[in-house]
C-alpha cells in the first residue's frame, strides 16, 4: 500500500519504519516500592514494536514529581536498570523508543510526597477528583506554590532524568509539557498567578519550560529531544485564556532549539476528526513550527491518512487503539477489524488488559 502512514520517516538521525507513533499512556504497572520498570512492561512494548516510534508512559523525574501510584521513575540507579530491560528488548526487536519525562505537579498527594508535604505547582491549585494513595482514594489537596529554589532544583532534575534515560538506552526523551501537569501549570494563565520572573506575561510563564529544555540540551543532543503540548486543555478548570497567542509564542520559539519533534495532543471525537477536520488545532500550529509535527488524539486510520495527505502532520500518535491491538499497523494495512480495549484495565492490575491482547488471527 502507498498510504503515507506506512512509509518510513527520517527523525533526525533515526529512521522510523513507519509514521505511526505509540502515544505515551500511563499504565501504572511498575514494581513497588522502587517504581522500577519490569519484564512485563518490556513485553508490553515489544508486542507493539511494529509501531514506528514507541513513547513510554510518563516517568517521573524526581520523588516530588510522583503522583500516579505505580508509574515508573527515572531518577534512581534502580530505575535506570529497570528501564534497560525495556530498551534492550525493544532494540533487539528492531524498534525505536523515547521515554516521556514528567512532573505531575498538583496531581499528587502528601502521602505520596517526600516528607508528607503538599504537592508542588506554579501557584496554589486544587484539582478536581481523587488520587490513589497508599491509604486508598483521597480527594486532591491544594498544592503549594514553588519557591525559586524548588523551581531551579526541578529544572536540574529534568536534566538528570534525561541523562539517566540515555544511560538506560533510550533513543530519546519526550518532555511532558501538556495536560495540566507541572510545566503546563506554569504556561496557562488560569493556573499561574505568580508575581515573579515566572509569572505574568506569556514570556515569563513560558520561562520554566524553556529553562527545562535548555537544561536537558546540556545533557543530550536536541535531535533526541521531543516536546508534548496540549493547546486545547483536557481540564476545564485548567486552561489558557488565549491559547493561540500563548502557544503560538512558545511554538515559534521552539524553532530555535531544533528539537526532534513537537507532539500536539488534543481531544476531538473520531467523528470530528473526519467530518470537521478544521476543528483540530494542529494545522494552525503547523504553520508556525518548522520541524517534525506529531498529531495525537482520537485518530482513526482514515483521519491519520487524511492529516498526513494534507501535510498537516508528519507522524500520527495512537493511544487506545494500541492498547487493544498490539498489531495495529498490520491491521491497518490489511483492513482487519480492531479490538475494543477494556477500560477497567487501563490503569491498574497485572497482565490482564496489558499484555494479553492477541494479534489478529483471522478466525
Image (cartoon, rainbow, N blue to C red):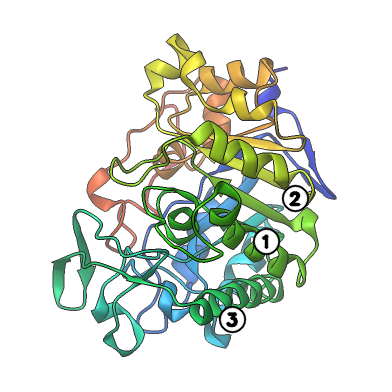
Q: Is residue 300 above or below residue 157?
A: above
Q: Assign the N terminus to one quadrant of the image.
A: top right
Could you tell which of marks 3 and 1 lies nearer the N-terminus? 3
> What number is the disc on residue 259?
2
Give the class, few, some or many, for how many residues have Cα within 10 Å of label 1's Cα (few <14, many ≥20).
Answer: many
N-term-proximal mark, 2 vs 3: 3
Residue at 45% in and 71% down: 72
Residue 333 position by quadrant: top right
Residue under circle 3? 81
The earlier-in-sequence mark between 1 and 2 is 1
Q: CA distance from mark 1 to mark 2?
A: 9 Å
Given this view, does label 1 or label 2 mark the residue nearer the observer?
A: 1
Disc 1 designates what residue? Answer: 213
One can see residue 51 in this view: no
Give yes or no for contact between labels 1 and 2 (Cβ–Cβ under 8 Å). yes
The answer to whether 342 appears left or right of 322 in the picture is left
Amino acid at each position: 500500500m502507498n498510504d503515507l502512514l506506512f512509509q518510513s520517516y527520517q527523525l533526525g538521525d533515526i529512521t522510523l519504519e513507519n509514521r505511526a507513533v505509540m502515544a505515551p499512556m500511563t499504565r501504572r504497572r511498575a514494581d513497588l516500592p522502587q517504581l522500577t520498570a519490569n519484564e512485563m512492561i518490556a513485553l508490553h512494548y515489544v508486542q507493539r514494536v511494529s509501531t514506528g516510534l514507541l513513547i513510554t508512559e510518563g516517568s517521573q523525574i524526581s520523588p516530588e514529581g510522583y503522583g500516579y501510584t505505580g508509574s515508573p521513575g527515572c531518577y534512581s540507579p534502580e530505575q535506570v536498570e529497570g528501564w534497560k530491560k525495556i530498551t534492550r528488548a525493544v532494540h533487539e526487536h528492531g524498534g525505536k523508543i523515547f521515554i516521556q519525562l514528567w512532573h505531575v505537579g498538583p496531581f499528587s498527594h502528601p502521602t505520596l510526597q517526600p516528607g508528607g508535604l503538599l504537592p508542588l505547582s506554579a501557584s496554589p491549585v486544587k484539582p478536581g477528583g481523587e488520587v490513589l494513595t497508599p491509604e486508598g482514594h483521597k480527594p486532591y489537596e491544594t498544592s503549594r506554590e514553588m519557591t525559586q529554589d524548588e523551581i531551579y532544583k526541578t529544572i536540574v532534575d529534568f536534566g538528570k532524568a534525561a541523562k539517566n534515560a540515555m544511560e538506560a538506552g533510550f533513543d530519546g526523551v519526550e518532555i511532558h509539557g501538556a495536560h495540566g501537569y507541572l510545566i503546563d501549570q506554569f504556561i496557562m494563565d488560569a493556573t499561574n498567578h505568580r508575581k515573579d520572573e515566572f509569572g505574568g506575561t506569556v514570556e515569563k510563564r513560558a520561562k520554566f519550560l524553556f529553562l527545562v529544555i535548555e537544561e536537558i540540551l546540556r545533557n543530550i543532543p536536541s535531535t533526541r529531544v521531543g516536546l508534548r503540548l496540549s493547546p486545547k486543555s483536557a481540564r476545564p478548570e485548567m486552561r489558557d485564556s488565549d491559547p493561540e497567542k500563548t502557544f503560538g509564542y512558545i511554538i515559534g520559539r521552539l524553532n530555535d532549539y531544533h528539537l526532534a519533534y513537537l507532539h500536539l495532543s488534543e481531544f476531538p471525537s473520531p467523528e470530528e476528526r473526519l467530518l470537521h477536520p478544521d476543528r483540530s488545532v494542529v494545522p494552525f500550529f503547523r504553520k508556525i513550527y518548522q520541524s517534525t509535527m506529531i498529531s495525537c488524539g482520537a485518530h482513526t486510520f482514515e483521519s491519520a491518512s487524511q492529516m498526513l495527505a494534507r501535510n498537516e502532520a508528519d507522524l500520527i500518535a495512537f493511544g487506545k487503539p494500541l492498547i487493544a491491538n498490539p498489531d495495529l499497523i498490520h491491521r491497518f494495512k490489511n483492513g482487519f477489524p480492531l479490538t475494543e480495549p477494556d477500560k477497567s484495565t487501563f490503569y491498574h492490575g497485572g497482565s490482564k488488559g496489558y499484555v494479553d491482547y492477541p494479534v489478529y488471527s483471522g478466525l
